Image (cartoon, rainbow, N blue to C red):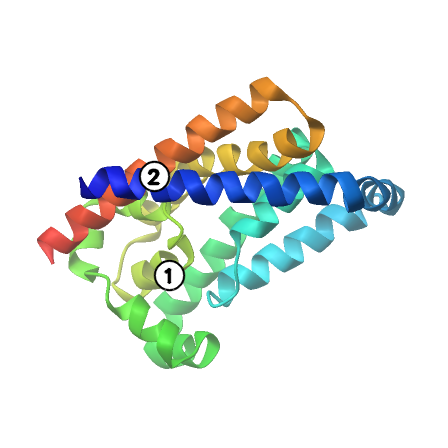
């Protein structure tokens, strides 16, 4: 019953997002997209900067930039932009935490976010690469990157988990943005299925983490 409620909740959020994005497409996107095309390389670089800051400062929303990348840059360019950004900036977050420890991380993200980072079971992440990959596929991937560094996870363990998680979790969100704004029904349908799959994975991973904590 609880899982059904979560699925219904996700469905409502996705439906509302589609409505909002459709309205934005109808009234504002086309002029903006024309301006973006005229910006050339600066448009992807701008999204890289915004997404990267949202990863290093987890209080800022990051999923919106995946939708924005798909909407403004198209699926292929948007996905490449987000994929590279996630891999690079999650590595930076991991490296900062691993090299400099708790105090610099807390100074960077704030006390509230720092407590959330500390809530992850570090030994469990280090000893379970499958759990690490699953957590990185959730909306808490930025927190998990810091937590893995603080917990002493090795780079050779973190990097493959990060690449796999990003390769699986980024396409549905970028495709959702591209599908809504381009009117591609097939892409939109596949994207929605991917989003539902990510929601189910996220719920299962969090439940497993709570159970073993």
- In the picture, the quarter occupied by the C terminus is bottom left
Secondary structure beneath disc 1?
helix
Which residue is disc 2 drawn over?
8
User: Dot 1: within a 10 Å radius of its alpha carbon, few (fewer than 14), some, or many (20 or more) residues?
Assistant: many
Observer-nearest of 181 and 206: 181
Q: Residue furthest right?
A: 38
The mark lying in front, picked from 2 and 1, is: 2
Observer-nearest of 53 and 200: 200
- Looking at the picture, how far across and down is residue 96, in whole percent? 43, 68
Residue 161: in sight, yes or no?
A: no
Quarter residue 143 falls in: bottom left
Residue 104: in sight, yes or no?
A: yes
For the point 40% across and 74% down, which residue is it?
105
| Mark earlier in primary sequence (2, 1) | 2
Observer-nearest of 200 and 111: 200
Left or right: 176 as drawn, with respect to 47: left
Quarter residue 130 falls in: top left
Q: Residue furthest left?
A: 212
- Looking at the picture, how far across and down is residue 50, in whole percent? 64, 59
- Looking at the picture, how far across and down is residue 112, in whole percent? 36, 77
For the point 35% across and 74% down, which residue is it?
114
- Using the image, determine if residue 157 lies above or below residue 210: above
Which residue is disc 1 drawn over?
143
User: Dot 2: within a 10 Å radius of its alpha carbon, few (fewer than 14), some, or many (20 or more) residues?
Assistant: few
């Amino acid at each position: 019953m609880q899982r059904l409620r979560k699925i219904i909740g996700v469905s409502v959020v996705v439906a509302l997002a589609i409505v909002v994005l459709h309205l934005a497409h109808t009234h504002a996107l086309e002029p903006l997209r024309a301006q973006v095309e005229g910006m050339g390389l600066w448009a992807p670089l701008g999204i890289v900067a915004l997404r990267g800051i949202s990863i290093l400062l987890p209080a800022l929303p990051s999923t919106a930039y995946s939708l924005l990348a798909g909407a403004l840059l198209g699926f292929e360019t948007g996905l490449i932009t987000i994929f590279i950004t996630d891999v690079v900036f999650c590595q930076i977050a991991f490296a900062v935490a691993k090299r400099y420890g708790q105090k610099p991380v807390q100074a960077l993200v704030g006390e509230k976010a720092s407590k959330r980072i500390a809530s992850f079971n570090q030994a469990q992440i280090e000893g379970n690469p499958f759990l690490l990959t699953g957590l990185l596929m959730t909306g808490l991937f930025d927190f998990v990157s810091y937590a893995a560094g603080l917990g002493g996870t090795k780079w050779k363990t973190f990097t493959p988990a990060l690449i796999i998680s990003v390769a699986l979790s980024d396409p549905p969100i970028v495709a959702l943005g591209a599908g809504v704004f381009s009117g591609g029904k097939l892409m939109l349908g596949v994207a929605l299925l991917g989003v539902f799959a990510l929601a189910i994975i996220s719920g299962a991973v969090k439940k497993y983490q709570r159970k073993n904590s």
